Image (spheres, grey):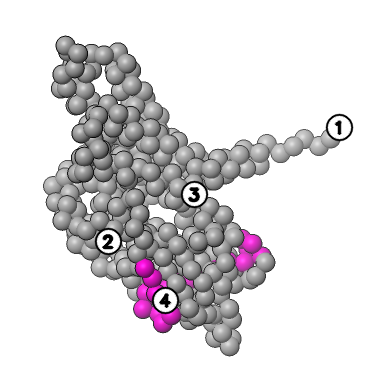
């Protein structure tokens, strides 16, 4: 159903994306191994031209891609999104040489990208990261420390890594580096997580980097990270909306066909009202995601707050909708291989990554008070 102010071209494109996901991406994803990078799936995303669109589309089109793919194939959605998250800093802040080396390969699905911000002791508090970049005889730095909860690690071909170049400077002392995976001293391991996409940890033992590896400017890496997250947070919301819609669609069909208490499940008012609530919340989240993405594309001043609201509402909504769908389906929804069993595992992580729900509330409050400064005492 059309929503927000999408024109006929974008509405048709959403339908086309869902069809491509069903016909060409879902069969490949079904052959993939959970917890591992699916390079065959990435290659198909490249052939379809979807990865290249990461670098030519605005925030709204990114959201439409993520939402549409998520409705049909969450594996394809996540593969696309992680390429965008890892490579966006290169696209937005990289030198000509960095972009020429990596972006065409990302667009083809031939190079796997990763965004390495979180650490064992610095997840939600990104400004507290402790991976150190120590000066190396004036020719660059040596990176020492650990990264954790990194999507696509340790299988990525390159990482956008954030390290502390100025001790004690908080967010102002962080630098972003483009780090190829073959650098000496860089090792990693996979982490077995609830969500089925690849996540790992990185260990950096005096890994060499030079000025040629810097993304943006030294000590300005926090702005690189936040700029990337401001773009991708609404699209995390779009991912969540896609999952919520898939769960809602499955529930409508199930309650329409399921016999119960002498009629159909949908005839029970308590069931019908729950389905109505699922639809209401899903559409509200969708509208907020689209509004935040449009604000980003228009260069609005309130993007951080809007992005936080969109991610918060959409991910919390998706958790509610998927959980309610499981309840209305009963035990069958918990059977391995059922759509809702898959969505139940997928839906939990977005409330944590790219800023947990609590972090989003903090951002919203900060932006709210900044927009309404205290009046001077009379």
Q: CA distance from mark 4 to mark 3?
A: 26 Å
Compared to residue 331, the image places residue 115 above or below, namely below
Q: Earlier in the sequence, mark 3 or mark 1?
A: 3
Q: CA distance from mark 4 to mark 1?
A: 59 Å
Badges 1 and 2: C-beta atoms under 8 Å apart?
no
Q: Which residue is mark 1?
A: 378
> How busy is the neighbourhood of tag 1: few (under 14 within 10 Å), some, or many (20 plus)?
few
Q: Quadrant of residue 240?
A: top left
> How busy is the neighbourhood of tag 3: few (under 14 within 10 Å), some, or many (20 plus)?
many
Q: Earlier in the sequence, mark 2 or mark 4?
A: 2
Mark 3, mark 1: which one is toward the viewer? 3
Q: Earlier in the sequence, mark 4 or mark 1?
A: 4
Residue drawn 29% across the image and 17% down it = 272
> How busy is the neighbourhood of tag 2: few (under 14 within 10 Å), some, or many (20 plus)?
some
Is residue 16 one of those drawn in magenta? no
Q: Which residue is mark 2?
A: 36
Q: Quadrant of residue 102?
A: bottom left
Q: Earlier in the sequence, mark 2 or mark 3?
A: 2
Q: Which residue is mark 3?
A: 355
Identify the magenta region: 169-189
Is residue 178 one of those drawn in magenta? yes
Q: CA distance from mark 3 to mark 1?
A: 39 Å
Mark number displayed over residue 186: 4
Q: Residue furthest right?
A: 378
Q: Horizontal and vertical percent for residue 69? A: 26, 45
Q: Quadrant of residue 82?
A: bottom left
Q: Residue furthest bottom?
A: 137
On the picture, is 264 further left or further right than 5?
left
């Amino acid at each position: 159903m059309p929503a927000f102010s999408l024109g006929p071209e974008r509405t048709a494109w959403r339908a086309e994306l869902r069809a491509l996901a069903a016909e060409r991406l879902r069969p490949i994803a079904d052959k993939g191994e959970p917890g591992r990078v699916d390079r065959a799936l990435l290659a198909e995303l490249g052939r379809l031209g979807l990865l290249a669109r990461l670098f030519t589309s605005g925030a709204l089109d990114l959201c439409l891609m993520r939402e549409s793919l998520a409705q049909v194939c969450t594996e394809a959605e996540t593969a696309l999104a992680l390429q965008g998250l890892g490579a966006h800093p290169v696209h937005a802040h990289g030198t000509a040489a960095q972009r020429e080396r990596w972006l065409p390969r990302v667009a083809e699905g031939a190079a796997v990208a990763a965004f390495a911000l979180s650490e064992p002791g610095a997840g939600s508090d990104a400004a507290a990261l402790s991976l150190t970049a120590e000066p190396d005889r004036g020719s660059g730095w040596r990176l020492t420390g650990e990264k954790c909860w990194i999507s696509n690690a340790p299988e990525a071909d390159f990482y956008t890594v954030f390290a502390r170049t100025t001790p004690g400077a908080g967010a102002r002392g962080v630098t972003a580096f483009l780090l190829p995976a073959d650098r000496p001293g860089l090792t990693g391991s996979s982490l077995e997580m609830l969500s089925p996409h690849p996540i790992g940890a990185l260990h950096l033992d005096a890994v060499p980097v030079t000025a040629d590896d810097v993304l943006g400017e030294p000590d300005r890496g926090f702005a690189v990270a936040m700029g990337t997250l401001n773009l991708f947070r609404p699209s995390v919301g779009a991912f969540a909306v896609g999952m919520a819609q898939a769960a809602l669609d499955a529930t409508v069909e199930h309650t329409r066909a399921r016999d119960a208490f002498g009629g159909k499940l949908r005839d029970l008012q308590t069931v019908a009202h729950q389905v109505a609530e699922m639809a209401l919340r899903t559409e509200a989240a969708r509208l907020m995601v689209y509004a935040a993405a449009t604000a980003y594309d228009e260069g609005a001043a309130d993007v951080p707050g809007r992005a936080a609201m969109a991610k918060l509402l959409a991910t919390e909504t998706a958790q509610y909708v998927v959980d309610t769908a499981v309840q209305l389906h009963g035990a069958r929804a918990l059977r391995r291989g059922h759509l809702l069993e898959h969505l139940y595992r997928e839906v939990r992580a977005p409330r944590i990554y790219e800023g947990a729900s609590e972090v989003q509330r903090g951002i919203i409050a900060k932006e709210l008070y900044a927009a309404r400064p205290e009046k001077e005492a009379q």
